[in-house]
Image (spheres, rainbow, N blue to C red):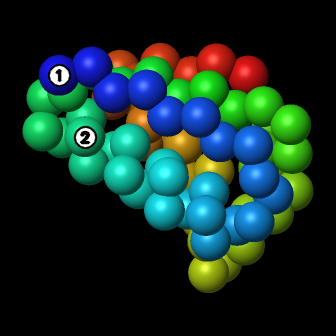
Amino acid sequence: MNIGLICSTTDPEILWNAFRFANLCLEKMDDVKLFLHGGAVAYHEVDSPQYKLEELLKTFTLSEGVLYC
């Protein structure tokens, strides 16, 4: 299945859930494309110990997810 996700928020909890969902889809052998625009492009600025966004996105890209910014 092909999955496309669009994120445009700076809310770390929403980004965290979107990145987790994208990684789950990759684990299920789906093709996933993640498009970040607006505030979501600065996800690294809202990264925190509670919401490890950079770690999730690294897993996403290493698992052959496609990222557009």
Q: Is residue 61 visible?
A: no
Check disc 2 and report its element: helix, strand or loop.
helix
Residue for badge 1: 1
Query: Does 16 sit left or right of 12 as displayed?
Result: left
Q: Can residue 22 be seen in this view?
A: yes
Q: Which of 8 and 16 is in front in this view?
A: 8
Mark 2: amino acid: Cys
Query: Does 2 sit left or right of 41 as displayed?
Result: left
Q: In this view, does 39 lie above or below 33?
A: below
Which residue: 61% across, 64% down? 14
**Quadrant in which the N terminus appears:** top left
- Residue 40, image x, y percentages: 77, 44
- Residue 64, image x, y percentages: 35, 20
Query: Does 64 sit left or right of 39 as displayed?
Result: left
Residue for badge 2: 25
Q: What whole-number distance in Å separates the C-alpha atoms at marks 2 and 1? A: 9 Å
The residue most toward the left is 28
- Graded by Cα atoms within 10 Å as few (under 14), some (14 to 19) or many (20 or more), the crowding at tag 2 reads some
Marks 2 and 1 close (CB-CB < 8 Å): yes
Check disc 1 and report its element: helix, strand or loop.
loop
Mark 1: amino acid: Met
